[in-house]
Amino acid sequence: MDAAGLTPGRLQIGLTGGIGSGKSTVARRLAAHGAVVVDTDLIARQLTLPGGAAITAIAAAFGADLIDANGALDRHRMREIVFADPLKKRALEAILHPMIGLETERQAATAAATAIVFDVPLLVESGRWRARVDKVLVVDCAERTQVERVVARSGWTPAAAQAVVDQQAPRARRRACADAVVFNDGITLEELERQVSALWACWTRPSQ
């Protein structure tokens, strides 16, 4: 990748959306169309698994009690800590973000595809990604729907799910950064696929 974090000659899409929006489903559909998906949230999870590259630094910064018996980050406890203390949140980001950036660039540089999708939950919040990609795709739905989906899939309380929604960028701010918005609320998977397919065809159509 060049100094701007781009891989010349390939369509680069920044994919984002609030928790529970269906962003991962859209990412899978784009992959089915032939894109390589670089999932920054998955990279973060891998860094904090047993033996992950971030474990030693996290234990040093936050204490060994944040590492569970298997050697992985206790994600639930860490989530509670960083939600309650912005300084702790920034300390965790200072550890993870450079590692995530390096692995993101490595995966993009070795991807054998004409289109790369960077799946970045906090794309808008970071302030850096808009200049690093050709297109920004936002997956959107009502906040109520976000909360309902997170509760259903994760078993969180509605209050816990709403707390995550509240910490993310507002829907209007995400949409304002988008080149396209997929509205994923009150529709079937088939209807969602039609939206994604039409957008893929538009963005990958050879220039006339």
Image (cartoon, rainbow, N blue to C red):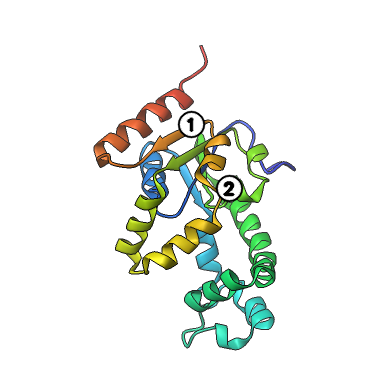
The residue at the point 65 percent across, 81 percent down is: 62
Give the residue type that dot 2 points to: Leu
What is the distance, in whole Å, between disc 1 and disc 2 at their CAs? Answer: 14 Å
- Residue most toward the top? 208
Image position, residue 15 (x, y; %): 50, 43
Residue 138 screen position, x and y as percent = 48, 40
* Residue 43 locus on image (x, y percent): 53, 60
> Cβ–Cβ below 8 Å for labels 1 and 2?
no
Q: In which quarter of the image is the N terminus?
A: top right
Element class at badge 2: helix
Precedes in sequence: disc 1 or disc 2: 2
Snapshot quadrant of residue 90? bottom right
How many circles with numbers are drawn on the protein?
2
- Mark 1, residue position: 180
Q: Name the residue under label 2.
A: 123
Q: Which residue is drawn at 57% across and 69% down?
A: 83
What residue type is disc 1 on? Ala
Residue 3 location in percent, x, y?
75, 43
Q: Residue at point 49% right, 37% down?
A: 137
**Disc 1 residue crowd, few under 14, some 14–19, many 20+, Cα 10 Å:** some
Q: Is mark 1 on a helix, strand or loop?
A: strand
